[in-house]
Image (cartoon, helix red, strand yellow):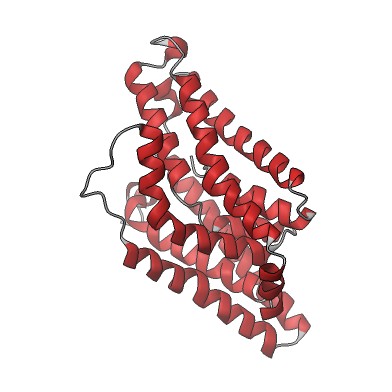
């Protein structure tokens, strides 16, 4: 019941998908109102950002996860309060994170940080499609086991989600930009982005209250591994983007995409 103080936390599992879908839809509506077709055309013509961003997510992140897993295997049993079972669990979790796409929250963060939103959206869409092939390969490589034959990714659901919650609201936002005045656009963008931030805050609070984050179960080494993995990936992505000579706004978008993929705000 709604009058029960912990109703939201107890039912968060059922509410999470709806909250996430609405949050992404609102944020994409707001960001779409800042973009034009030319922005995406420029991203395609300036292909360096796309190539560097894809390499950072599909090659750099899995390689970094593999290195962290190798180092993790050097620790003695029960070091830092981390049991063998806990170590295996964290290692498997890192492999899963490295294999899966980040999500559309990165687009919102890129927008707020004045990064290249068109590049961010393009990378999110491409890497999500790429996970249909890359995920089984990365899992098999990092976990060092053969992926079961019945392992399957719901391809139709992924494509449906991209269409409904990423592309459709993005196009609708672009239509708003093309058919309204500048003051109306500013009001619309602020309304959509602020509403999406409220929903994002609810998702974070719900995750905490529902007991999704249980760092204490892994001793102090568990959170330390997570922090090192996330920060290391972000630093490597930044250095990689700079070494490749990408523009500053493109580099910011790439770093945020990597941060989202490594779970910097999902743990």
Which x, y percent locates residue 263? 52, 43
Q: Quadrant of the N terminus?
A: bottom left
Is there any visible trace of residue 265 in the rendered image?
Answer: no
Which x, y percent locates residue 210? 38, 42
Which x, y percent locates residue 174? 63, 80
Q: Is residue 184 left or right of residue 155?
A: right
Asked if 89 appears above or below 49 in the picture, the reply is: above
Front-lying residue, 9 or 156: 156
Is there any visible trace of residue 179 in the rendered image?
Answer: yes
Residue that appears at 45% across and 42% down: 97
Residue that appears at 50% across and 77% down: 168
Name the residue furthest left.
150
Asked if 31 appears above or below 173 in the picture, the reply is: above
Residue that appears at 43% across and 13% down: 81
Front-lying residue, 86 or 12: 86
Snapshot quadrant of residue 214: top left
Snapshot quadrant of residue 172: bottom right
Asked if 58 appears above or below 67 in the picture, the reply is: below
Front-lying residue, 115 or 49: 49
Q: How many marks?
A: 0
């Amino acid at each position: 019941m709604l009058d029960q103080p912990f109703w939201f936390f107890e039912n968060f599992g059922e509410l999470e998908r709806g909250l996430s879908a609405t949050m992404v839809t609102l944020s994409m509506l707001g960001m779409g109102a800042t973009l034009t077709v030319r922005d995406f055309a420029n991203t395609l013509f300036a292909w360096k950002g796309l190539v560097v961003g894809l390499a950072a997510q599909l090659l750099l992140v899995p390689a970094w996860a593999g290195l962290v897993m190798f180092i993790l295997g050097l620790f003695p049993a029960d070091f830092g309060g981390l049991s063998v079972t806990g170590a295996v669990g964290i290692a498997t979790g890192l492999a899963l994170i490295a294999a899966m796409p980040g999500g559309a929250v990165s687009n919102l963060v890129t927008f707020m940080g004045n990064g290249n939103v068109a590049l961010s959206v393009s990378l999110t869409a491409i890497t999500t499609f790429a996970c249909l092939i890359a995920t089984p390969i990365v899992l098999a490589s990092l976990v060092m086991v053969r992926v079961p034959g019945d392992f399957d990714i719901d391809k139709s659901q992924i494509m449906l989600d991209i269409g409904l919650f990423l592309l459709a609201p993005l196009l609708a936002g672009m239509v708003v930009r093309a058919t309204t005045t500048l003051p109306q656009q500013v009001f619309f963008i602020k309304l959509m982005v602020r509403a999406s931030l409220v929903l994002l805050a609810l998702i974070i609070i719900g995750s905490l209250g529902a007991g999704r984050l249980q760092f204490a179960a892994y001793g102090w080494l568990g959170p330390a591994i997570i922090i090192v993995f996330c920060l290391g990936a972000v630093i490597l992505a930044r250095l990689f983007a700079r070494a490749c000579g990408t523009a500053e706004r493109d580099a910011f978008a790439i770093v945020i995409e990597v941060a989202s993929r490594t779970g910097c705000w999902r743990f």
